[in-house]
């Protein structure tokens, strides 16, 4: 069975630590967990992980990040890994950016910060069936 990687991308370390802790508490060792503090770092991690493993990919990304915003990042991920599950977790994104990401990156869901764990888990549980 294919392993699934969950990559969390946010420029705030405290957010990354919180999401990763919540995911590990809920899913245990079901998934591999990675974090990145920028879209650039995330793209490097994806290249390395997907090159080494034949894996499914779930990306949970913030929108407002320096250099490359979340919508641009998720579009890049989609262009290379169209079967990946893309989730935006943000308090900043405007409707136009969300719609662009839905159209150009097949965004699965946008969850507003502060998020509820149950909403995040439900999104992953339903989305995993699609990849």
Image (spheres, grey):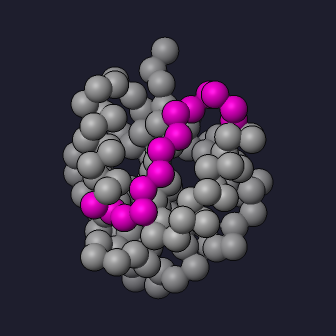
Who's the residue at 32% across and 56% down the image?
A: 41
Q: Quadrant location of residue 56?
A: top left
Drawn side of residue 113 relative to residue 131, left or right: right
* Above or below, 102 relative to 56: below
Drawn side of residue 107 relative to residue 118, left or right: left
Who's the residue at 40% across and 75% down the image?
A: 65
* Above or below, 73 relative to 44: below
- On the image, the x and y values in percent for residue 54 come to 34, 23
- On the image, the x and y values in percent for residue 110 come to 54, 66
Front position in the image: 126 or 69:
69
- On the image, the x and y values in percent for residue 91 come to 58, 79
* Above or below, 31 relative to 7: above
- On the image, the x and y values in percent for residue 124 come to 61, 45
The residues colored magenta run 27-40
Determine if the magenta segment contains residue 43. no
Q: Quadrant location of residue 31?
A: top right
Can you say which quadrant of the picture contains the C terminus? top left
Who's the residue at 47% across and 36% down the image?
A: 5
Who's the residue at 49% across and 15% down the image?
A: 1
Determine if the magenta segment contains residue 37. yes
- The reply to whether residue 99 is visible in this rendering is no
Drawn side of residue 108 relative to residue 70, left or right: right
Say how many tags the image has: 0
């Amino acid at each position: 069975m294919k392993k699934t990687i969950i990559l969390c991308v946010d420029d705030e370390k405290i957010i990354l630590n919180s999401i990763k802790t919540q995911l590990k508490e809920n899913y245990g060792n079901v998934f591999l967990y990675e974090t990145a503090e920028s879209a650039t770092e995330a793209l490097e991690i994806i290249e390395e992980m997907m090159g080494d493993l034949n894996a499914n990919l779930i990306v949970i990304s913030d929108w407002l990040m320096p250099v490359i915003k979340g919508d641009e990042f998720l579009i890049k991920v989609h262009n290379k890994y169209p079967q990946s599950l893309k989730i935006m977790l943000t308090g900043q994104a405007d409707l136009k950016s969300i719609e662009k990401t839905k159209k150009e990156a097949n965004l699965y869901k946008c969850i507003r910060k502060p998020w509820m764990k149950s909403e995040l888990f439900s999104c992953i549980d339903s989305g995993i069936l699609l990849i």
